[in-house]
Amino acid sequence: MKAAVKPGLWKKWTNQLDLQSMVWPGIIFVAIFSYIPMYGVVMAFQQYDIFNGILESPWAGLMHFRMFFEAPEFWNVMRNTIVISLLKLIITFPAPILLALMLNEVGNMGFKRFVQTVSYLPYFLSWVIVSGFVFSLLSVDNGTVNFLLERLNLIQEPVNFLAVPEYFWSILVSVNVWKEIGFGSIVYLAAIAGVDPAMYEAASIDGASRFKQIFSITLPSISPVIIIFMILAIGNLLSAGFEDILLLATNPILRPYSDVIDTYVYRVGILNARFSYATAVGLFKAVISVILLVTANKIARKADVSLW
Amino acid sequence: MRLSLGDKMMQRSIYLLLALMSVIMLYPFWNALVISFNQGSDTALGGITLWPRAYTLENYYIVFQDHRLLNSFMITILRTLSGTALSVFFTALLAYGMSKKTLLFRKQYMVFFMITMFFSGGLIPSYMLIRSLGMLDTFWVLVIPGIISVYNMIVIRTFFAALPDGLEESAKMDGCSNYGIFFRIVIPVSGPVLATIALFTAVGYWNDWFTGAIYITKDDLLPIQTLLRQIMNSNIMTEIGSSNAIALDHMNRNRTITTKSLTMATMMIATIPIILTYPFLQKYFVKGVLIGSLKE
């Protein structure tokens, strides 16, 4: 902070000591819990040794990054990360918009409030609970899903859904939609409420159907909000999910379809204690994410919306 | 407004779809609740979908007798209360300071905070930090790392900045310090926004299992969600054929109990406190979410 050297500034600063003292606990906290770990990423370039610590551990250059790119899991992990992210972007992302559009067509206030309340509910459940629901409903011995499918004669034998790798992506995405759809719709509902009603009146006088009005009035009006959330979603493209996957993919059979960068970092880093390697993989992800975020924001700026 | 035939059909299908969706939203919860009230050995026969067939309270009875579960329930309550109080207080204090245009280095501070929203050191360096702070296997690791939330700070700051200036002017004339204004004027008028933030923070603390999973190895410090996950995992293991201490112990003592029925009862106990708070706060949090999504 070289500005503080100026005598005037220092005096000004001490003059507002009470205001500054409100901010500094927060600054110190963030410095410790966010910035020290950022400094900790130098471990990625070291042969980190618990006993030597970051200051004494020998340097390893880009070795860990190379190891990751050459690891047999690399392509699999990358494929899962990208496919799961894209599936979430195509399905989980628009689902709340669709729900908001539908809720907006509901005239019966009681029904509307009921649907909203019910749809927010899963957002308040932990992923542990949600995974418990999923295990129970999909269970081979008498889960409701198998029960129904058998009753309807759609299957002869109960299916162990969570042990078939090919089913994992659909299950994961469905559960995510279930958990997030209601809560995600709040912001879009508010945006829709802000659309000028005169536009709808004019359109219906011109004979536009409700369906047409949705496409030519509602959607264009809320597109800035959609774009903002889209940018954030793109910035998170390499965070395909962590808690949800870790908790739902407990069966190692699923790994060829369930392992993503974050779960891989957790497994090799915490469980196998390969600290430097896992940090390198995590850093790789973080850097690409920032690049994606900045790029998405730049593109969105051309459409006059941006995060910063 | 008169609706055309096509509009009417669209509206009917929307009502139908939304009704169907509501059922899908509620059913998993309902089913788990029903199983938790059904005799375990009967549940194992299958077909429990909408109502308990052999109603019983013994699943809950046994769960409430397990001192490990009760203990982690207490840990979770303590953690949620202290974490929420500390977090809301320090985040609001920070937000108040940051809302003042006169604050020196305000822009620089903001950049400093914003960066952490987009970039972080990741799992391993954070683990190393907690370890070298000596916080592994302590109660405080369950509370302290979550105290300052930059996102919440921005939400509260946006709210503070929108408060009318006159509110504070008169207090300042009377010689009130910034702390005086913060405690006596700003906090009392910020009830709804602080309640919203408190709700989300509390839900966050209550539902967090991961902190417990990586930083806690002592049984008597495990939060309920982490313990629940361990029980569920060993439950899956018993299906595969290995053994699980708590559940097997109960099962040997009482043949009508199964791991599934116990898990469901535990799940309900770990969920219902949160579920009970939210309908009352719904109107606040909808507003709160919107304040957060507004741009400055």
Image (cartoon, coloured by chain):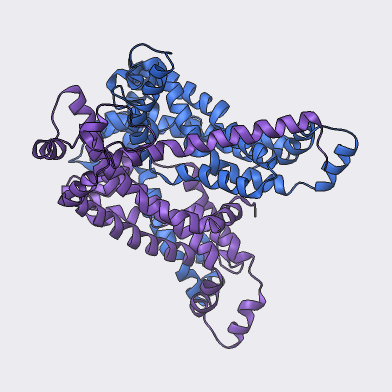
Q: Residue at x 20, y 41 (%)?
A: A52
Using the image, determine if residue B180 lies above or below residue A249: below
Taking depth in this image into account, of B20 and B148 the one nearest to the observer is B20
Q: Residue at x 39, y 24 (%)?
A: A145
> Where does the image place residue A247, in percent across and percent down from the top left?
33, 33
> Where does the image place residue B269, in percent across and percent down from the top left?
30, 49
Would you say A299 lies left or right of B145 here?
right
Q: Total number of numbered labels?
A: 0
Would you say B37 lies left or right of A98 here?
left
> Where does the image place residue B208, in percent across and percent down from the top left?
35, 46
- What's the colour of chain A in the image? blue
Using the image, determine if residue B69 lies above or below residue A212: below
> Where does the image place residue B283, in percent across and percent down from the top left?
56, 57
Q: Residue at x 50, y 65 (%)?
A: A5
Would you say B77 lies left or right of B134 here?
right
Taking depth in this image into account, of B186 and A179 the one nearest to the observer is A179
Quadrant for the C terminus of chain B in the image: bottom right
Q: Residue at x 25, y 56 (%)?
A: B75
Taking depth in this image into account, of A238 and A57 the one nearest to the observer is A238
Give the image quarter of residue B16. Answer: top right
Quadrant for the N terminus of chain B in the image: top right
Letter of the chain shown purple in the rendering? B
